[in-house]
Image (cartoon, rainbow, N blue to C red):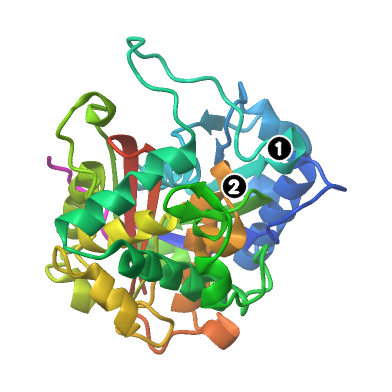
Amino acid sequence: MASNGIRDRVAIVGMGCTQFGEHWDKGPDDLLIDAAYQAYESAGVAPNDVDAYWLGTMGQLSGLTLSVPLKIDYKPVTHVENFCATGSEALRQACYAVASGAYDLAMAIGVEKLKDSGYSGLVVSSPANDGTLGNMSAPASFSLLAPAYFKKYGLDPAKGKEVLARIAWKNHRNGAKNPRAQFRKEVPMEAILNSPKVADPLGVMDCSGVADGSAAAIVCRAEDAQKYTRHPIFIKALSFVAGPGEGPLAQDYDFTTFREVVASAKDAYTQAGVSDPRKEISMAEVHDCFTPTELVLYEDLGFSPRGTAWQDVMSGFFDLDGGLPVNPDGGLKSFGHPIGASGLRMMYEMWLQLRGEAGPRQIERPTLGLTHNLGGAPGRCVSFVSIVGR
């Protein structure tokens, strides 16, 4: 796969992010307004200064979902969806629009109001298929990763379960330091290990939660960035791939890797000029929808050699004070997963960290940050990888 990329041609000059959680007293309009006006304020602009908008949210039909609450009459508003990478897709489209010269200033914004549904996740109809796909819950689909990884790399199931629990423990420990997170308490390893089973070997504490939330970013051409802020962050790479969806139909499919992630990471590293991500990436926000997902991602993203990520987990390499902090804001485990907002929420952490504004979870002198979104299920998914820097 080849892409030309837009390295250092686009800057993020303003961002906003709501607190994620249960917002029974607010609707999607309220969350959108909150995130958008935080972004306007941080960039020092008014709604009408933004030339075009990209909205990421699931199950809606048009840009009216954004134009009505923000009162941005007669502005171009594009509605995008791409599974759980919807928010990241909105950002990618806004960045490419600015890089093309079509617009000077654009906003990417995402929102989801999941708690209102009463279900544990987003209620949407299944995408078109040939009728041979099985009907599995999300925890069941992702639970396939764990025994496959344990068997391939010789981990005793009890030891493997401990590795998964430490990933959840780390993310909740980070989230406890974040005022925007839904869950802001550290969780003992014992409580994670003994949480009620959902899809063996995954317990409740191996799964991300359900939340409401919104996040937004304002982007412009790099040469204009200083007009809006003294501390912009710059797009180094944006890569998005959709896989062939063959996993659930193949008897010998390898569930120890997401091939889509490998492809998008390779493309992103080429765009950004990164040759050794383990050493060159300062921090990462990855799609920890379930703990074995994060374990497999460490290797697919090139942070750990194949078969060794579990050792890096246990050594603390991915902890906040480790060699490559992953999910410093607490990740999906601490934030929950309002689909359209998650990708932009991840970018919001990069915005804070690269500007030195992350408070008690600030990483020392970060230079490059990576965000990753996964949409779909193992063997049938889309993947997004971004790299940003100062």
Residue 250 versus residue 354 in the image, above or below: above
Residue range of the region highlighted in magenta in the rendering: 1-10
Disc 2 and disc 1 in contact, CB within 8 angstroms: yes
Residue that appears at 83% across and 46% down: 26
**Nearer to us in this view, 269 or 292:** 292
* Circle 1: residue type: Ile
Q: Is residue 180 left or right of residue 326?
A: right
Residue in front for this viewpoint, 120 or 339: 120
User: What is the number of the mark on residue 72?
Assistant: 1
Label 2 crowding class (10 Å Cα cut-off): few <14, some 14-19, many 20+?
A: many
Secondary structure found at label 1: loop
354 horizontally vs 175: left or right: left
Instruction: Indicate which disc residue 50 carries.
Output: 2
Task: Measuring from the top left, give residue 172's x and y in whole percent.
Answer: 56, 72
- Residue 354 seen in the current view: yes
Q: In whole angstroms, how far apart are the C-alphas of marks 2 and 1?
A: 9 Å
For the N terminus, give its image quadrant.
top left
- Determine whether, in the image, residue 220 is placed left or right of residue 310: right
**Toward which corner of the image does residue 339 lie, by quadrant?**
top right
What kind of secondary structure does the magenta stretch mostly adopt?
A: loop
Q: Which mark is residue 386?
A: none
